[in-house]
Amino acid sequence: MIARLFIKEFKATSFLGKKGYKKILNILSSIILLGLFIALEVLLYINIFDKVNVYTDFNDALFIILSFVFFIAGIFSLVPITYNAFFKNTKERIILGTSPASTFDIILAKGLNIFFKALIITFSTIFTISLAYGIKSEKDFVFFVLMFFNSLGISFLLETFAFILVIPFREIRKIISRYKIVSFIIMMIFLIALALLYGAVLNLFVNLIRNDDIGSLFTVDSVNVLKEISNYLWPIKNVVELAKVNEVNLNFVIFFSFVVFSYVAAIFLFNRYLNDYYEGKTEFKKAKKQHTFSVKLTSIEGALVRKEFNLALSNSDGVFSYISLIILEPFLVFSVISAVNLIFHTGNLNYISTLFPSIFLTVDVILIMLFIAIINTTSTVSLLKERNTLLVMKTIPVSYFKQLLIKISVPTILSFISFLVSILALVIFNEISIVDFLFLVLVGALVIVLLNLVSLYNDLKSKSKSSLLSMLISFVFPFAAVALGAVLSLLVEPYLESVVFYLSIIALEIIVILLFIIKVKERVTKLFMKYEGEAR
Amino acid sequence: MKKKAFLFLLLLPFIIAIFAFVTASYVIRGVEVNITGITLEHVGNVPFLLKDGKQLLKASPIYDSNYPLSEGNDLVWTSSDPSVAEIQKEGDEYYLVPKKEGKVVVTCSNSKGTAVASFSAVIVGDGGAIVVNPIIPFSQSKITEIDYVGLFDTKEAYDAHSETLKNYDASLELDIEIVGTSSSLDGFTIETSSNIEFDRQTKTISFLDEGEAYIDFINPFSESGSAHLEFTLVNAINAYDYDDLISLTNKASKPYKIVLRSNLESFVNTYNFDQDGKISGLKSKNTSFFGRLDENEEVMSYLDDLYVFETTYNHDFLNKWNIEIDKGLHEGEEKTNIYRYAGLRIQDDFYGNGFTVNLHDLTYPSGTQSVTIDGETYLVPYLTKDDLYRGPLPFVTLGNPNYSMTGVLPMFTLYGQDNSGVYIDHDNVTLNDVHFKNCDFGNNLSNLEYVGSTIDINADNVTIKNSIIENGRNVIRSYSSKNLTIENSLLQNAMEFLFRSGSNEYNHVNYDENAIYNGANGRKYSSDKKSYLAPISGKYSEKTYKADSLLTFATISNTQAGEFLGIVGPDYTKEEYITFKNDLVNNLTNTDGFIDQDGNKVYAGTSKIIHTNFYNSGISAVSLDTLPQGSFLETNITSVFKMLLGIYMSDAYPENMALTSFPTRVEIGEGVNFYDWKNTNQLTYESLLGQDITTLIVSHGGLGSDFNVEITEDDYLPLKKLLLDNHSSEIVKENKVNLPFYIEGGGFNDSDLVLNQELSEVLTSEIEIDPFTYSLDLEAIHSDNFNSDPLAKYETMKVAMLRASFNVIGFNNYKMYGLKASEGTWFNETPSLDYLRNYGA
């Protein structure tokens, strides 16, 4: 039973959950992204190691701090994974709750699958940097062996902590989900905090590579504070000391105690909680509300617009949902653009920006367009979201063209507002000039319209979310447009460079939009009539 | 897929940033750490009763506890007359053992004698004694024995006084203690000099006229129980604290003579702190803070108090940059600064009274980081955005001159004038018995990079005597100052030089004269100088013997750079390059006005140094400076070099700036000692020239991202290499060298060094270094696939860049004098303050 449950869970993971070429593509892209992450992580760590090596005894403390950060991040990544494994599928409660499998078997089967993910997290982070640290610090072979086994232990700890924390996580989630506005506000705060954290990490990193600022990060005081902090980062501190064969008995006892106690606590608490869940004890007893239905008379167009807003704001992808990304966009765009601008005034790249003054403008525009494109791809499923209302759409007395126009206009407006806030922040904080801002408003607006047109056309035509056309417009078009602008700007006098750069992008966008409008308008009724939604 | 794309987008800035990595490097010029001062528990005249027997002596050394002290810093005590009171050592403690009635001077110093403090012990017998001290104590660390007191306390009183109206508003309040007897003050007979009056009620001395003054309190029962206090009244204003000093210097509309009456120390040296780091009191009664504190006990900005002046050094290039900014060139860049800061602008005589003025909180970078180099830990300061002192102004930069704010280095930077702790621009100023230091800097002279010169002089007839001047990038910088005298002083701790002599006056290239130069087979050519110095306009292959042609092929000779640049040229010989060097120097040099009508050399500055100790320089004790004279500064040749730089530095080219500096004269009189032996591995000339050749090579070279580019001073100013390669046997003793004199090259240097006979005997003969000729012999490794061979390209670029650096600095030889290793004079010795205290005794 355990084995069967495990295999079922394992097959349902995102790695293997798809079929055919998508499965291969999915696995490949995951491996590439993970490989890229590990390569980047190691490269960064080695660079940081070399840079801070001059600070007395600081690398030991830094390794512990980084490992601890990964440890905490690992726990918080596993909590939603654990939640999804046990509680997301409400139907499963009925099936498993009544099945002969004990909750312990279920925990074990699903737990094995979660442990597999914990291993990926630990070995791609803590173990990877421990290898880099060990090699750079010329540690003995025993360090690497011990870190390998310790990483297994850390993975186990991650899981047990996740099991414990998923209980409050679900309870809080339950409470919050009852209050839509509170839920939305909390999500916004969470997202903004996440974006600010990203900005802070990026800023820290960029400062780190700028030698003139490195001192402000690692002063005598801050190094001492960090060293002091590292002494209290249990159990990671003990894991590292154990691998370094320092005070072996003490550190082993501490680490082992962590493992045992967290395991006992996790099994005891979670087993009990899961039992209650399967028995339906943890569900809210919904108060019987007297529902009164009031019918407001409104125009069909108004109702359609409201429907589109509801669709756009419906949240099923967590952080990666459309509305989340719309909120995140200004923060992320600002963090990334200001960091890139700073980077281009730093070290080796400073020379390149002297050689090609417009290089960072080019990179800025590409990044902004890519952000718009990626965020917009998350809204393109709005037609797919229609599901049951598709029939209504086809029968209400509003022209299909008008309906689709409304469908496009809502995400377009939302995307544009977010984009406008992003570039307003950039111009206010002097990251781009007023002229750049004015041009970018137009460039961004047009690209948003274009992307929505393309995704609509794509929805109607191919029923496939990731068709080639959509990919081309979302990812290749920004590069092509900016490349065209950059090449044409090289042909004119320096003072005209940026004007020609933007105008050529705008011209290209207008041409492509016109082509689509003509094409969509011609065929919209036919395509829409043929459209039957997509099986999900 | 979209999630992954999104994650990738968020990772992208990190990936881009990796390509911008730059490496950190620190230069350590280690020095021995000594205590910087001693605070005694006993101050002034202190009574000791005979009947009480021995008394414990207490002293606190002043030093930065972050650095371990070198040997010879244990405190030792001495008595001036052991028959009256002797010093007894028990374990680590010292005791004063009174023997008989009388008075002795008790002195505490570190055993190597670099820090001294003393007080007077009055031994009181049965007859009792009177002990008299000023309420504001005199210094315990004077070089001379005279205590000066100003007749005035305010500028208003000083301004109002005249021969007839002597409204002296200063006075001297006394602390009078009668011990060992029941007598009152009335029982003592009081005698004073005629220029003072004493009021028994207020116990205050008022002043009637300048001159030596004394007051005697005569004990009718015991001669030794009497008290004698003497001081010298001068027509000057007393400065008791920072506000007084700023008011009398930087904020003074006219020169004022100043008498310093207190130490002005750094924040940490001024206050005691409680466990929470809050100020709990002053460390010493006669010490106050050089600066102001806000309500949170934070040091306030000095900006409004500083003396700010337009640099007196040539700043044509900086002006040019600023004009170009006004014209809209250098998009995104800002105008550059042409002003310098001085902590104190001293405009008239300054009586230091042995007190210390420490400008640490003004000049020292406010960031500190701990670094470990070769197993040794150093605290290295770094600039933060609010720091005012950020190193010398550039004279010329090949690249953006605003590097001190942006952190982005130009490819080459030639330095101009630095900020200073003390600036003297009025003639006839005397500094007497003062201890000026720009900062406390730990154990590494490199920490002095940004703190400025300790004293910068641009005035005639200035005298510095009986003083300790220390801790600056350069300690005393004297430019265009005639008749400077440095006497009986200690100059110590400079990252570069302890004394720099130079000139603000110069000549431009004389284009009225024709250029004379050698051609093939000794044939002399003469042509218009503009044409001689002009960039090549025709074919590179033409053998013209003009400057750019020879410079171009000298730069790329013995390398495959010509292949890389697509230049094929005439085969000049090495001898022709050497002859050319002399021709170019002659044609750039303009000595008009160097000789007066009587046939005497005209010096822009003269100085005489007598009975003075030099201790711890980064390079040499004394430098005779000149101005750079590179061909690139004049007409932007070598033109190939300009082509390379073109994309790097837009339009900001120096023009008409190969200047010939007027000479100066430095005379070293009797009794000058050079305690300046330094490890050869810590000797470096790299700070004399700023550069970022690494970026140029990385950016231009196409060497591949994993190719390690490492540039050392041997690749652009190989003075150390040539010095040690060719002269080690003469000057190196146990891996140490002592090079008292450096006569700067690059530009034409006609300055004169006059040495006394005694010193001449322990010095080597003049060491002349010719880096240009040395560079001609360098060869880059040959590769059949040059364009795809990173090592060959790298070697070639290094050789070419070394030769190109002469285009900027100039081609004249460098001269030095070292102490003979065989004599080993002052080897492993440190200067004692007793040498100064006993001067003239």
Image: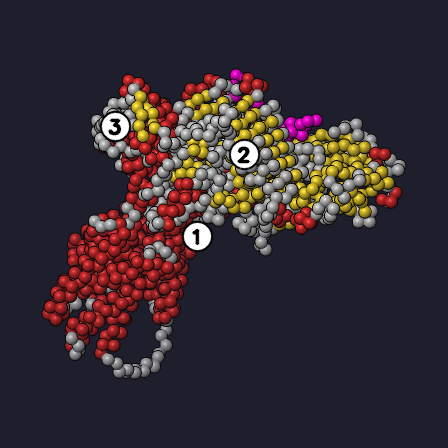
Taking the spot 80% from the left edge, 45% from the top edge, the residue there is B198
Residue A306 in view (yes/no): yes
Q: Whole-percent x and y of residue A404?
A: 19, 70
In front of the other: A185 or A342: A342
In front of the other: A459 or B766: B766
Badge 3 marks a residue whose secondary structure is: loop
Q: Whole-percent x and y of residue B712?
A: 39, 31
Which segment is the magenta one? B819-841
Verify whether residue B732 appears in magenta. no
Q: Are marks 3 and 1 on the same chain?
A: no
The residue carrying mark 3 is B560
Taking the spot 79% from the left edge, 47% from the top edge, the residue there is B203
Taking the spot 51% from the left edge, 32% from the top edge, the residue there is B604
Badge 1 marks a residue whose secondary structure is: helix
Left or right: where does residue B738 sit relative to residue B48?
A: left
Spatial CA distance of label 2 from label 1 is: 80 Å
